[in-house]
Image (tube, rainbow, N blue to C red):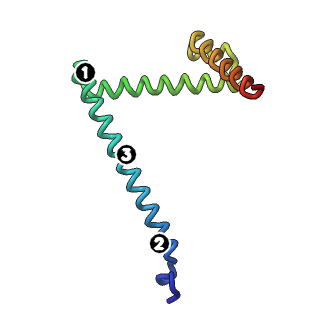
Amino acid sequence: MVAGRIGSVSLRRLGAIGATQRAFKNVAEQFVTMAAEISDRVREIAEATDLPESEVFERALERGLETLWEDLVLKRYLGGKIDREEAIEHVGRTKVERAEREQQIVEEDVDWGLNA
């Protein structure tokens, strides 16, 4: 047996495996913590609104999906993948106009930064 090796596995490789296991454990712990926080929030909202927890989850999912959909539509519009009218059709004129203003402000800030 060569120093630094156990059978055909190097100590470096064993260290990498241990690091991977620790990282996985850390992610798992974060997931459990996040799940507990979500459960606590759902329970509190359900109690405060006299709704069943299942309905709180349903409403949260609907709101979350709506927000993700709007973000996708606006990203496609600002990226030139869909036209303005299609974006308005999907998310409404107010949201499209707000996204245009925000993009204009960012572009002005970038121009200012490049020319300062």
Would you identify the image quadrant in which residue 71 lies? Answer: top right
Q: Which mark is residue 14?
A: 2
* 3 or 2: tag closer to the N-terminus: 2
Instruction: Point out residue 88 in the picture as x, y percentages from the top left corner.
Output: 61, 13
Quadrant location, the C terminus: top right
Disc 2 and disc 1: Cα gap in Å?
Answer: 51 Å
Q: Nearer the viewer, residue 110 or 102?
A: 110
Classed neighbour count for the residue bearing mark 3: other residues with Cα under 10 Å, few (<14), some (14–19), many (≥20):
few
The residue beneath circle 1 is 51
Q: Taking 91 as reference, is 81 above or below it?
A: below
Q: Secondary structure at mark 1?
A: loop
The residue beneath circle 3 is 31
Q: Which mark is residue 60?
A: none
Whether residue 81 can be seen here: no
Classed neighbour count for the residue bearing mark 1: other residues with Cα under 10 Å, few (<14), some (14–19), many (≥20):
few
Instruction: Point out residue 3 in the picture as x, y percentages from the top left corner.
Output: 51, 85
Q: Nearer the viewer, residue 52 or 34?
A: 34
Instruction: Point out residue 50 in the picture as x, y percentages from the top left corner.
Output: 22, 19
- Under mark 1, the amino acid is Leu
Q: Residue furthest bottom?
A: 1
Q: Taking 58 as reference, is 32 above or below it?
A: below
Q: Residue furthest front?
A: 116
* 2 or 1: tag closer to the N-terminus: 2
Disc 3 and disc 1: Cα gap in Å?
Answer: 26 Å
Classed neighbour count for the residue bearing mark 2: other residues with Cα under 10 Å, few (<14), some (14–19), many (≥20):
few
User: Along the horizontal axis of the image, is 46 left or right of 79?
Assistant: left
Q: Nearer the viewer, residue 65 or 97?
A: 97
Q: Secondary structure at mark 2?
A: helix
**Mark 2, mark 1: which one is toward the viewer?**
2
